Amino acid sequence: MTNKLRNFSLELFPPQTPEGAEKLRAARAQLALLKPRFFSVTFGAGGSTRDRTLDTVLEIQREGHAAAPHLSCIGSTRESIHTILEQYRAHGIRHLVALRGDLPSGMARPGTFRYANELVQFIRIETGAWFHIEVAAYPEVHPQAKSPLDDLLALQRKIEAGADSAITQYFYNFDAYAHFIDECQAVGINVPIVPGIMPISSFSSLARFSDNCGAEIPRWIRKRLEAYGDDTTSIRAFGLDVVTHLCEKLLAQGAPGLHFYTLNQVGLTSTLWQRLGLSAAGAETLP
Ligand SMILES: Cc1cc2nc3c(=O)[nH]c(=O)nc-3n(C[C@H](O)[C@H](O)[C@H](O)COP(=O)(O)OP(=O)(O)OC[C@H]3O[C@@H](n4cnc5c(N)ncnc54)[C@H](O)[C@@H]3O)c2cc1C
């Protein structure tokens, strides 16, 4: 598969303050030069970033780029999701990342939807084929899954409910992704499953985040990152080598694209993009 047929996308989170919004605008101007297929914008569980996600998506659209809002359903009512879908439709947004989300601590009510497949089904009932729907997938297994098979079947239910493609949680084990794709194919999941890529900028935050979301930092990587201590230059240089190699392997083995978790930062994602020669892929992608 040539790069022109693959999906290269960038994930952002909505800013919390006017200063954050200004910084994100500047970062986005740089990231837009990479010509990603789309920018996705995260959504706080329970609707906590609802307006900020919408505002960010609309800004991206006004700047002339494709935007895909994330939409998580935990803690939400049918009515609130309906309202959000109508807003996106009214603004001509046609691409969503549909998620369950995680209940913020202290929020006891799960709301109308228990799992993401129920959200996907609701979106299809409400809006037919209007949206291209992405869902989340977990090559290293979602931390709350009863078993790897249960998790695979949960993904299958999301596809059967009408999802068009999936983006994975980040991982650093190539074999976890390769094995997961084999398992998906064995149960008849044939939609594109785009690897999520997390650049490495610091050890402590990556370790904390990875523990929470169930992504493994392989021992050989963890040991080296730990040993660099506060030497961020070495951490970033080593991280770039590790992640470049992972992405090269993924693309060589036929991954249908890459989705970068930018954390609203330009440097590492841009460098990875250049190293992988993705600029040439440009926006000339699938219809
Ligand atoms: C690409 C990507 C983007 C993300 N963006 C956001 C975001 O913007 N905002 C946000 O809050 N979070 C986001 N997340 C995190 C995500 O919300 C969490 O990982 C959440 O815990 C699970 O969401 P899901 O959509 O995968 O849930 P689901 O697919 O519903 O799965 C959640 C868990 O329930 C299990 N399960 C599913 N169905 C059943 C069932 N019927 N019975 C029992 N168990 C079941 C699954 O195996 C899994 O363990 C993102 C994750 C990824 C990979």
Image (spheres, rainbow, N blue to C red):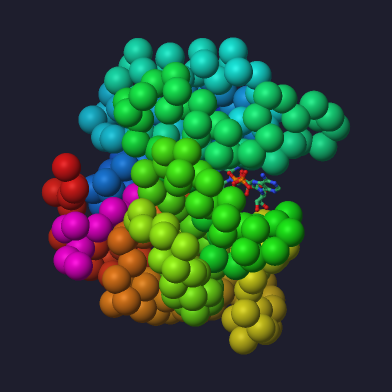
When the figure is inspected, residue 12 is found, relative to residue 72, above or below; the finding is below
Left or right position of 15 against 108: left
Q: Residue at x 14, y 49 (%)?
A: 284
Q: Position of residue 76 (x, y in %)?
A: 66, 23
Q: Position of residue 196 (x, y in %)?
A: 46, 58
Examine the rendering and report whether any part of residue 56 can be seen.
no
Instruction: Name the outermost residue toward the front.
Output: 187
Q: Residue at x 60, y 18 (%)?
A: 78
Q: Quadrant of the C terminus?
A: top left
The stretch in magenta equals 1-15
Q: Position of residue 207 (x, y in %)?
A: 69, 66
Q: Position of residue 12 (x, y in %)?
A: 46, 42
Q: Nearer the viewer, residue 221 or 227?
A: 221
Q: Nearer the viewer, residue 120 or 269?
A: 120
When the figure is inspected, residue 200 is found, relative to residue 192, above or below; the finding is below
When the figure is inspected, residue 182 is found, relative to residue 169, above or below; the finding is below
Quadrant location of residue 245? bottom left
* 201 drawn magenta: no
Q: Nearer the viewer, residue 104 or 242?
A: 104
Q: Residue at x 42, y 41 (%)?
A: 163
Examine the rendering and report whether any part of residue 45 can be seen.
yes
* 11 drawn magenta: yes
The count of marks equals 0
Q: Residue at x 41, y 66 (%)?
A: 185
Q: Quadrant of the N terminus?
A: bottom left
When the figure is inspected, residue 136 is found, relative to residue 49, above or below; the finding is below
